[in-house]
Image (cartoon, rainbow, N blue to C red):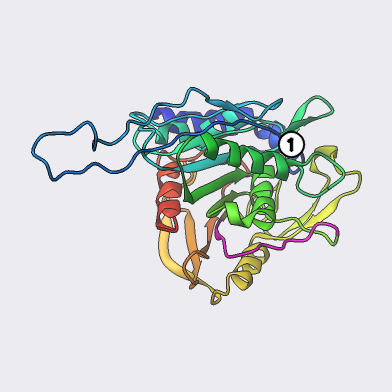
């Protein structure tokens, strides 16, 4: 068993009890600075001329952002501060933190071969115990504000490719990815929501300002965040159980918003779960305008926290780059 597969397997065993709550809230903050690049070099002369050589961009010294809820920005191998890179933000499930979630999703390992900036922030703690993201109660922590400022502050210090800013969330983090897509659409290229649907209410509706690329991954056998929708109190964060839509209903909402044609099955299948033999995941896709892709990956016989195959992060990366706005 490879290192990444082993991580996914151990995660599914050790954290199944913790995440069986699923859904939730949080809080905001800072970082600043700037990096200025120089003009392109003039390649017409035989010998390099110091006056026309490109200005060398210094490596930023700031790597921690987020104010009183700090998060360290992870850089890829061979990072070049002059090169604008994609930014991927991981949003964890209820009861875990950003670091564990990013490891489970294999994203730090992916940075060994792919060039992107990685942020894995933490939500606030409910009753001083469970980290959560606030996706449904405006009287609680302003997580939308916190995460928005985090994206803005990192972009002030590092060269972020604004056409390739992505959120990848699991469970409660999947719900939060949708919340961000609803509220700060102009800052996000696309989201991947894994085992988390979209919660809205009259008090907090979804009003995206433009199209967003959406990939939804879910199992019909998920007993925590149910594929067909249900009710949750988010591990006690909500006083009363609140309804949430199912996977198909959520995807269809974005199909309508992005002005796509209906969701249709494809012949593509994927192997994303170690414990299910063969390619257990089917792919459904809508025909959409550029910048508003919508897909549903349905993982047959998988649990809420599947043991992910080694290729999971690569599959996610390929999808994100295909819909990068480039």
**Prevailing secondary structure class for the magenta stretch in the rendered image:** loop
Q: Secondary structure at mark 1?
A: strand
- Dot 1 corresponds to which residue? 132
Which of these two is toward me, 144 or 201?
144
Q: Which residues are magenta?
A: 203-215
Could you say which quadrant of the image residue 254 lies in? Answer: bottom right
Q: Position of residue 81 (x, y in %)?
A: 39, 33
Which of these two is toward me, 44 or 199?
44
Q: Position of residue 279 (x, y in %)?
A: 42, 53
Question: Measured along the vertical axis of the image, is residue 322 above or below residue 26?
Answer: below
Q: Position of residue 106 (x, y in %)?
A: 47, 35
Quadrant (top left/top right/bottom left/bottom right) for the N terminus? top left
Could you say which quadrant of the image residue 182 lies in? Answer: bottom right
- Residue extending farthest bottom: 261
Which of these two is toward me, 121 or 195?
121
Residue at (20%, 43%) from the top-left corner? 42
Does residue 300 appear in the picture of this structure? no
Residue at (11%, 41%) from the top-left corner? 45
């Amino acid at each position: 068993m490879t290192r990444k597969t082993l991580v996914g397997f151990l995660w599914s065993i050790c954290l199944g009890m913790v995440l069986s709550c699923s859904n939730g809230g949080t809080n905001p903050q800072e970082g600043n600075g700037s990096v200025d690049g120089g003009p392109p070099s003039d390649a017409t002369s035989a010998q390099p001329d110091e006056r026309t050589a490109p200005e060398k961009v210094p490596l930023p010294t700031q790597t921690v952002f987020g104010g009183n809820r700090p998060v360290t920005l992870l850089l890829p191998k061979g990072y070049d501060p002059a090169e604008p890179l994609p930014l991927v933000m991981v949003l964890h499930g209820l009861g875990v933190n950003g670091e564990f979630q990013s490891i489970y999703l294999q994203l730090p390992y992916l940075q060994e071969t792919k060039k992107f900036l990685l942020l894995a922030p933490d939500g606030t703690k409910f009753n001083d115990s469970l980290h959560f993201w606030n996706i449904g109660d405006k009287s609680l922590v302003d997580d939308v504000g916190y995460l928005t400022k985090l994206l803005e502050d990192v972009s002030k210090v590092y060269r972020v490719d604004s056409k390739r800013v992505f959120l990848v969330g699991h469970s409660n983090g999947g719900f939060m990815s949708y919340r961000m897509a609803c509220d700060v659409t102009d800052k996000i290229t696309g989201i991947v929501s894994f085992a988390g649907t979209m919660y809205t209410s009259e008090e907090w509706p979804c009003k995206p300002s433009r199209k967003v690329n959406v990939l939804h991954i879910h199992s019909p056998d998920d007993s925590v965040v149910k594929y067909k929708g249900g009710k949750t109190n988010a591990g006690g964060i909500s006083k009363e159980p609140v309804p949430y839509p199912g996977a198909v209903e959520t995807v269809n909402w974005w199909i309508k918003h992005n002005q796509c044609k209906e969701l249709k099955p494809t012949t593509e299948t994927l192997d994303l779960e170690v414990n299910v033999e063969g390619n257990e995941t089917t792919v459904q896709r809508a025909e959409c305008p550029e910048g508003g892709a919508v897909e549903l990956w349905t993982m047959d016989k998988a649990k809420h926290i599947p043991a992910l195959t080694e290729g999971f992060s690569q599959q996610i990366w390929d999808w994100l780059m295909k819909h990068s706005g480039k």
